[in-house]
Amino acid sequence: IRVYAVNGSSNKKVPEALFPQKPLITHMYTADPSAHVFDGKLYIYPSHDIESGVVRDSSGGHFDMRDYHVFSIDEVTPNTKVVDHGQALHVDQVPWATKQMWAPDAAEKDGKYYLYFPAKDKNNIFRIGVATANTPTGPFVPEAQPIKDAYSIDPSVFQDDDGSYYLYVGGIMGGQLQRWQTGSYIEEDKYPADNEPVYMPKIAKLNADMKSLAQPLQDVVIQDEFGKPIVQGDFDRKFFEAAWVHKIKDIYYLSYSTGHSRFIQYGTSKSPYGPFTWRGKVLEPVLGWTNHHSIAEFKGKWYLFFHDSSLSDGKTHLRSVKMVELIHNEDGTIQTVDAYFG
Ligand code: FUB
């Protein structure tokens, strides 16, 4: 019996994991799954974890990924078949990028598919790139330059009902968001005091070309139940990385990872720009340091996509994607998932 060091069991009623402890993909390590339904099929755009030999450090150098594969699922069953569509983009094809192809996302508009990805440029600064394809699986052709004025990591693109697309970005520490607080990059890691608002994720509307920002990145405020911005000392609820937005009726849900405390928390809002009011936890900590997820509706059910390091026996940089059903309660709250003790 393998016992995983997670933060204890939850006594909440949680949906039954569809594949408890079972990674969806086992022939390679995958992480940071961004899931979307395009033309009735479920696609997963994950990071492709590898063992490159880079020693673990606080800036995440050991997450030394080089390419992306796209995966698809036709039907969710206890033995769901996941198809690997092969390499969709490699860092060597991206003129401005040098390394660390971290968590990507994808969007569809007018029959074209856009892959958004962070990577380090020649100056070791994380930028956000975009690449285009005629199919959801690629191959994707990258732009020669990163998206102007976009930075940090963990891009996710939310398509609203009115046809607008919004780019969310941001990650602390290795993700460098703390270095952009003046609006330009500074080579210094400065963090708020415990009683000051935490660094928030950023949002900008995308232009019609899907390759440029229609406005400067701005903060997406996450506030507590009293309407005050979540502060740096709020260890269990502060934003760290992995912002993801989904919408049900007119409620926008922003879910995100808290980093060191390793939860996926969420808030709700009436606007994609926020402010988002904290409502609860989506996911308890998983095996491995990182916790990163996405949420998508497929054939009438909502699913949570996440990763853990169970397939590599706990190696933080060698993760595997999993999925479970996610239940939204009548009052709009989400039932917390505990991937191990449900
Ligand atoms: O996969 C590399 C980084 O680890 C991601 O960008 C973060 O969200 C974390 O999962």
Image (cartoon, rainbow, N blue to C red):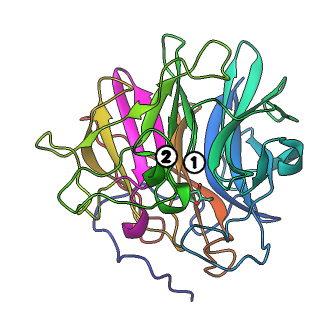
> Taking 307 as reference, is 225 left or right?
left
**In the rendered structure, which segment of residues is drawn in magenta?**
239-261
For the residues labelled 1 and 2, the Cα–Cα distance comes to 5 Å
Residue in the picture at 66% in, 20% down? 210
Q: Earlier in the sequence, mark 1 or mark 2?
A: 1
Residue in the picture at 36% in, 40% down? 328
Residue 320 location, x and y as percent? Answer: 67, 64
Identify the amino acid type marked 2.
Gly
Q: Main secondary structure of the magenta part?
A: strand
Q: Answer above or below: position of 95 versus 143.
A: below
Res 241 seen here: no
Instruction: Report the disc number at residue 65.
Output: none
Residue 67 location, x and y as percent? Answer: 81, 52
Residue 34 appears in which quarter of the rendering? top right
Within-10-Å neighbours for mark 2: few <14, some 14–19, many 20+ = many
State yes or no: residue 243 in magenta. Answer: yes
Residue 245 appears in which quarter of the rendering? top left
Residue 2 location, x and y as percent? Answer: 56, 87
Identify the amino acid type marked 1.
Ile
Q: Which residue is mark 2?
A: 170
> Taking 130 as reference, is 228 left or right?
left
- Depth check: give the residue in front, 181 or 91: 181
- Depth check: give the residue in front, 77 or 97: 97
Q: Which residue is mark 1?
A: 153
